[in-house]
Image (cartoon, rainbow, N blue to C red):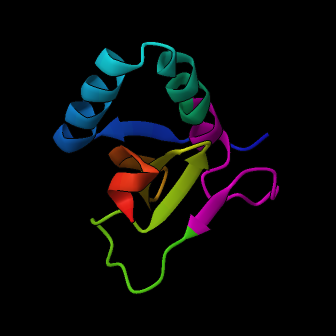
């Protein structure tokens, strides 16, 4: 079994998450589920999740995106660490 990835959060992610959770408390379960997925398979090698590597994005800006319904979570992978950068509604992202 592969080693799990360590999940870290940025201050921007924490601000985004707090704002969303105040408006929609049911998103707690969504965030917990996304953290589990990213801890196990952030590269989406199993092809089970809606994960995309974004083009022309530099490391440190959220090169990867995972989608859950209308929400998008951007993150980067550095070795065995996954750093979460933002959690936003799709209308704010595009």
Q: Which of 80 and 12 is in front in this view?
A: 12
Q: Can residue 44 be seen in this view?
A: yes
Q: Can residue 4 be seen by looking at this rendering?
A: no
Q: Magenta residues, as a range?
A: 36-52
37 in magenta: yes
Instruction: Say if 25 sits above or below 86 in the image.
Output: above
Residue at horizontal 49 percent and vertical 75 percent from the top: 54
Where does the image place residue 8, in percent across and percent down from the top left?
35, 38
Q: Residue 76 appears at what percent x and percent y? A: 41, 59
Looking at the image, which residue sits at the far bottom?
56
- For residue 69, what is the image quadrant? top right
Task: Report the side of 2 relative to 16 (left or right).
Answer: right
User: In the rendered view, would you say 6 is above or below 41?
Assistant: above
* Foreground of the two, 81 or 48: 48
Residue 15 lies, in percent from the top left, at 20, 33
Extreme residue toward the front, this view = 91
Relative to 71, residue 63 above or below:
below
Q: Which residue is drawn at 17% across and 38% down?
A: 11
Name the residue at 56% across, 52% down. Answer: 66
In front here: 92 or 60? 92
């Amino acid at each position: 079994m592969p080693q799990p990835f360590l999940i870290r959060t940025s201050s921007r992610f924490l601000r985004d998450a707090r704002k969303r959770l105040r408006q929609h408390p049911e998103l707690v379960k969504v965030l917990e589920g996304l953290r589990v997925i990213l801890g196990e398979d952030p590269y989406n090698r199993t092809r089970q999740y809606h994960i995309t590597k974004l083009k022309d994005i530099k490391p440190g800006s959220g090169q990867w995106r995972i989608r859950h319904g209308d929400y998008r979570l951007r993150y980067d992978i550095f070795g065995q660490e996954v750093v979460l950068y933002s959690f936003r509604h799709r209308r704010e992202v595009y």
